[in-house]
Amino acid sequence: MISKFKNIFLAAFLFVAFLAITASKPVDIIGLWEGKTADGEIIKLKFLKNNQTELYKSKSGRINGEIGAAMFWPTYKIDLSTNPIQLDLVFADSDGDAAQTQLCIVKFNGENKIEIGFSKTFDKRAADFSSKEVGAIWSLERK
């Protein structure tokens, strides 16, 4: 009887331990993510370990009056403990001082797909992806 109880207890303990290990796996945003906006603009966003990013947008630059590609290098802050995940992209001015912070929310769809929701204004973060406060959503895949 005691042996049977020990086996049940051991099986339950191992099951709970397995759930705790798999549930606490940290989400990794580091790396290159690519996709398109709703209007077809190509986006490449690379998150670096030092809280820097490299952001390529295919239709956000202007050269000699023509719309073209542009590169940006915002820093980022991410809070993985919130739901939805909070992401701040901090853009600097020409002197390197923080000039504007874009408040975003992030949803992981598996390990290799994310959605980034951009708030319509710079002073209030969207509460969720269905909110009227979301101005744009980028769907990106890890490359």
Image (cartoon, helix red, strand yellow):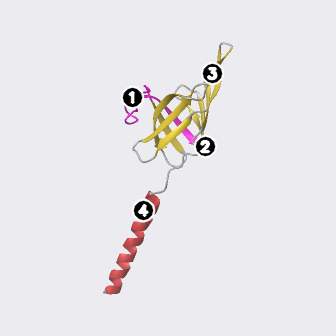
Q: Earlier in the sequence, mark 3 or mark 1?
A: 3
Q: Which residue is mark 4?
A: 20
For the residues marked 3 and 2, what is the alpha-carbon distance in whole angstroms? Answer: 23 Å
Residue 67 highlighted magenta (yes or no): no
Q: Earlier in the sequence, mark 2 or mark 4?
A: 4
The amino acid on which the numbered mark 1 sits, given as a three-letter code, is Glu
Asked which secondary structure carries label 2, the reply is loop
Asked which secondary structure carries label 4, the reply is helix
For the residues marked 2 and 1, what is the alpha-carbon distance in whole angstroms? Answer: 28 Å
Asked which secondary structure carries label 1, the reply is loop
28 over 97 or under it: above or below = below
The amino acid on which the numbered mark 4 sits, given as a three-letter code, is Ala
Residue 61 is marked as: 3
Q: Which residue is mark 2?
A: 48
Asked which secondary structure carries label 3, the reply is strand
Q: Secondary structure of the magenta portion, mostly?
A: loop
The amino acid on which the numbered mark 2 sits, given as a three-letter code, is Leu
Q: Are marks 4 and 1 in contact (CB under 8 Å)?
A: no
**Quadrant where the C terminus is found in the figure:** top right
The picture places residue 46, in percent across and down from the top left corner, at 61, 39
Quick check: 52 left or right of 20?
Answer: right
The picture places residue 139, in percent across and down from the top left corner, at 52, 36
Q: Are marks 4 and 3 in contact (CB under 8 Å)?
A: no
Q: Earlier in the sequence, mark 2 or mark 1?
A: 2
Q: Which residue is mark 1?
A: 133
